């Protein structure tokens, strides 16, 4: 019968301990720095390239776009890529 009263107390203690601990700190890193950059200065856009894929060519355009900020206020930059079919020269 004593367990009936102790169980809610144990559950409340576990809840308070779990909520009171440190939150998971996000990690803003990438194994490939060519797709993500952290900092207030915008990275330079790479030149547009044309890839010959045999029977057709593809124009590849890459641009850096802001995707929010880190908790300490630094800008997050991510590289967006677009492709378009173009005639081969």
Image: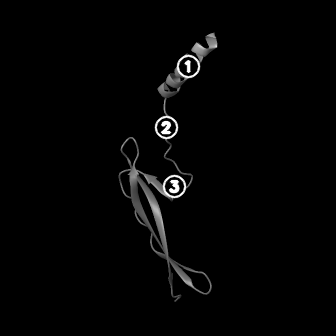
**Residue 33's mark?**
3
CA distance for labels 3 and 2: 20 Å
Viewer-side label of 3, 2: 2
Viewer-side label of 1, 3: 1
CA distance for labels 1 and 3: 49 Å
Is 56 positioned to the left or the right of 41 in the image? right
Residue at the spot of label 2: 25
* Residue visible at 45% across and 58% down in the picture: 78
Residue 72 at x, y percent in the picture: 38, 41
- Extreme residue toward the top, this view: 2
Which one is earlier in the sequence, the residue at label 3 or at label 2? 2
Q: Is residue 51 above or below residue 32?
A: below
Viewer-side label of 1, 2: 1
* Residue visible at 50% across and 43% down in the picture: 27
Residue 40 at x, y percent in the picture: 35, 51
CA distance for labels 1 and 2: 30 Å
The one of 76 and 19 positioned closer to us in this rendering: 19
**Residue 66's mark?**
none
Which one is earlier in the sequence, the residue at label 1 or at label 3? 1
Quadrant in the picture for residue 57: bottom right
Residue at the spot of label 1: 8
Q: Is residue 53 above or below residue 26?
A: below
Count neighbours of disc 3 (C-alpha within 10 A) and say few if under 14, some if 14 to 19, many if 20 or more. few
Residue 62 at x, y percent in the picture: 46, 68
Q: Indicate the quadrant containing the N terminus: top left, top right, bottom left or bottom right.
A: top right
Mark 2 element type: loop
The one of 67 and 20 positioned closer to us in this rendering: 20
């Amino acid at each position: 019968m004593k367990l009936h009263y102790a169980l809610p107390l144990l559950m409340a203690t576990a809840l308070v301990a779990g909520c009171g601990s440190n939150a998971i700190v996000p990690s803003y890193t990438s194994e490939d720095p060519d797709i993500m950059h952290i900092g207030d200065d915008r990275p330079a856009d790479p030149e547009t390239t044309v890839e010959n894929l045999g029977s057709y060519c593809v124009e590849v355009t890459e641009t850096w776009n802001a995707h929010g900020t880190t908790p300490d206020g630094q800008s997050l930059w991510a590289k967006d890529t677009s492709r378009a079919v173009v005639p081969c020269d």
